[in-house]
Image (cartoon, rainbow, N blue to C red):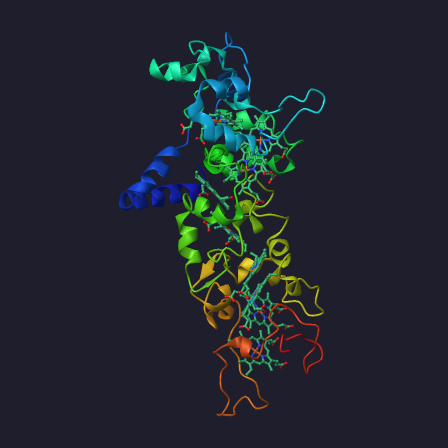
Amino acid sequence: MNEKTKIRAVLLTVVAGVFPFLAACAALKQDRPLLPVQEYERMIVGRLDAEYVGTDNCVSKCHRHEKIADDFKHSVHGEQIKPETGLPLVNCESCHGPGSLGIEQISDDVADNDAKKIKCDTSTFLDIKNLPTPAQSLICLKCHSAASTPSLALWNASAHALNDVGCFDCHKLHKGPQQKVSREEMAEMCYGCHPEVRAQNNLFSHHPLREKKMACTDCHDPHGSVQPNLLKGNTVKEVCTRCHMDKQGPFAFEHADVTENCANCHTPHGSINNNLLNAAMPFLCLQCHAGHSIGANPSDATRTLFNNRCTDCHSQIHGSDVPTSTQKKGDFLK
Ligand code: HEC
Ligand code: HEC
Ligand code: HEC
Ligand code: HEC
Ligand code: HEC
Ligand code: HEC
Ligand code: HEC
Ligand code: HEC
Ligand code: HEC
């Protein structure tokens, strides 16, 4: 746990006291010692004395899974067929482990089974919900290697993997045919563990996440990234100027290297200040500059110190190609 994580953990615990529903989340995500990968690999092999029987067998014997089976058939996973054989590449047992022992006692007569209350013996499957998180993720990663799913290349080093968050925490595979996290439902799903971001997005000035015109993955890659804060791309500027291209430059007169990190002045999720600013004007500018006055005669009593909205005059704050009257400097005046 780094310092930030610790503080976050304490905060989360405090909040959890107030909102009991968060307690489950906090309790779920405790740091557990990591084991060597082979240990996790061993956990997901399944019973060695069981055989693979195929989705049709699983489903025909347990009709209560009809919705699951139907959704699955229409999911990307269900649609994967090996071209050479025509057999499915992904089936129930790809994730749940071999199933022959589970249906051993069940006859083909479904009504008879129901009457005799014979159920499939789920204890012979992988105990998928109670495996340690890294083992759960490994079930997916055996197919979703970096080669097949490039966006997962940095998964193991991601803040999520390192903090005991696994694939199923975000991907609810049996909720419907959709295996991906949809853009409409994404923010709600993420807020479950990141309630502070919801609070920020409810502020007056905000990116239109709550209007569902944007999604967290416009800026973040939840699977891992080379930047801090799981940001996409190589720099903060790169993330922002993908949409705000007019701020990209290069300009003849740059605001030094200040605009290389848009977060020097802006906060991404929401702010009480206009334009997602970190601080209100003029305090934002006064963090780095002194207020000033203009005029030929310094002793002129009518001169006022401009300590108000600096951008009333310096409107081209992100950089300008137009020199000022001094012809040397870009004072971002127009
Ligand atoms: C790609 C992996 C994957 C495949 C394929 C898959 N499942 Fe699952 N299944 C999961 C995961 C993960 C869970 C537990 C977490 C959850 O509920 O999201 C689960 C849970 C379940 C549960 C328990 C649900 C509950 O609420 O307790 C049943 C029943 C189930 N699966 C049946 C099936 C059947 C039947 C098939 C084939 C038609 C199938 N699964 C295919 C990953 C998979
Ligand atoms: C037996 C192999 C296999 C396993 C195990 C598996 N997948 Fe997949 N998955 C695939 C294939 C093949 C595709 C389709 C091609 C692709 O998108 O890479 C796919 C696609 C997906 C997609 C993309 C869906 C879309 O709409 O584009 C998601 C999300 C996904 N899998 C999540 C998971 C998760 C989470 C797990 C673990 C519970 C998992 N998969 C386990 C083989 C597998
Ligand atoms: C913190 C939440 C989160 C976790 C954890 C997570 N995913 Fe995802 N995943 C997403 C979101 C959100 C998307 C949709 C991406 C988009 O819209 O750009 C996605 C998309 C995908 C896709 C679709 C193809 C792609 O590259 O975008 C696959 C495949 C996938 N995830 C597999 C996995 C696997 C396997 C794991 C575990 C190793 C995992 N995910 C863990 C949130 C998560
Ligand atoms: C417009 C781009 C953008 C969008 C959209 C966005 N973020 Fe962020 N997020 C950032 C940036 C930039 C940072 C780094 C902030 C900094 O350096 O001060 C960040 C930081 C974070 C952090 C870590 C620091 C913190 O504030 O707690 C979390 C967690 C986070 N974002 C979650 C989310 C979630 C969840 C969503 C969707 C509801 C989301 N973000 C949408 C740009 C974005
Ligand atoms: C099951 C809980 C859970 C879910 C769901 C979840 N996260 Fe996280 N997330 C965490 C934990 C735990 C951490 C690491 C501790 C921290 O920094 O808060 C984290 C860290 C982050 C960070 C900061 C990374 C850093 O470098 O500090 C970002 C950004 C983030 N998550 C974005 C997202 C987004 C976007 C989603 C939805 C697609 C999401 N999270 C869904 C639990 C979750
Ligand atoms: C996926 C596209 C996208 C990305 C990436 C993006 N933005 Fe935005 N941004 C928008 C949209 C859409 C709006 C809302 C425009 C509107 O309401 O007219 C907006 C609005 C803004 C505003 C004005 C807010 C207000 O209150 O009027 C600022 C400032 C801003 N973004 C800064 C940033 C910064 C900084 C980043 C990088 C961390 C960033 N944006 C990344 C799409 C994006
Ligand atoms: C030195 C501080 C500073 C930095 C750094 C900065 N901005 Fe701004 N930005 C502002 C101020 C101040 C405003 C409000 C302008 C006004 O009051 O007229 C603003 C307004 C905006 C707006 C909304 C109004 C408009 O002009 O479209 C967007 C979008 C924006 N900034 C994007 C960015 C992006 C993208 C970056 C990084 C490349 C960035 N900003 C870096 C200070 C900054
Ligand atoms: C994070 C620090 C920082 C913030 C915040 C900041 N600036 Fe700057 N600004 C600088 C630096 C560094 C320079 C370059 C100084 C130099 O070249 O002497 C500069 C240069 C300038 C210049 C002079 C340009 C020139 O060519 O001489 C003006 C005008 C200016 N800033 C206005 C503003 C205004 C207005 C704001 C608030 C919206 C602001 N700055 C916010 C750091 C900052
Ligand atoms: C009424 C218009 C106006 C307001 C308001 C204003 N400025 Fe200026 N500022 C100017 C002009 C004009 C210049 C160019 C003066 C020159 O070229 O001699 C300038 C120059 C500057 C410079 C460059 C000075 C130098 O010597 O390089 C900085 C930095 C600056 N302003 C910051 C600010 C800050 C910070 C604020 C808000 C607290 C602010 N300005 C408010 C008009 C204004």
Residue furthest top as drawn: 49
Residue 319 picture location, percent across and down: 65, 69
**As displayed, is residue 152 above or below residue 88?**
below
Q: Quadrant of the N terminus?
A: top left
Q: In the drawing, does residue 81 fall left or right of residue 137? A: right
Q: Nearer the viewer, residue 42 or 182?
A: 182
Q: Nearer the viewer, residue 209 or 119?
A: 119
Picture quadrant of residue 83: top right
Q: In the drawing, does residue 108 fall left or right of residue 26? A: right
Is residue 166 among what the camera can see?
no
Q: Nearer the viewer, residue 29 or 60?
A: 60
**As displayed, is residue 127 above or below residue 223?**
above
Which residue occupies 67% across, 24% down? Answer: 82
Residue 84 picture location, percent across and down: 72, 21
Q: How many marks overall?
A: 0
Is residue 106 among what the camera can see?
yes
Quadrant containing ligand 9: bottom right
Which residue occupies 42% across, 9% down? Answer: 105
Q: Quadrant of the C terminus?
A: bottom right
Which residue occupies 67% across, 80% down? Answer: 324
Q: In the drawing, does residue 189 fall left or right of residue 224? A: left
**As displayed, is residue 178 above or below residue 183?**
above
Residue 291 picture location, percent across and down: 51, 76
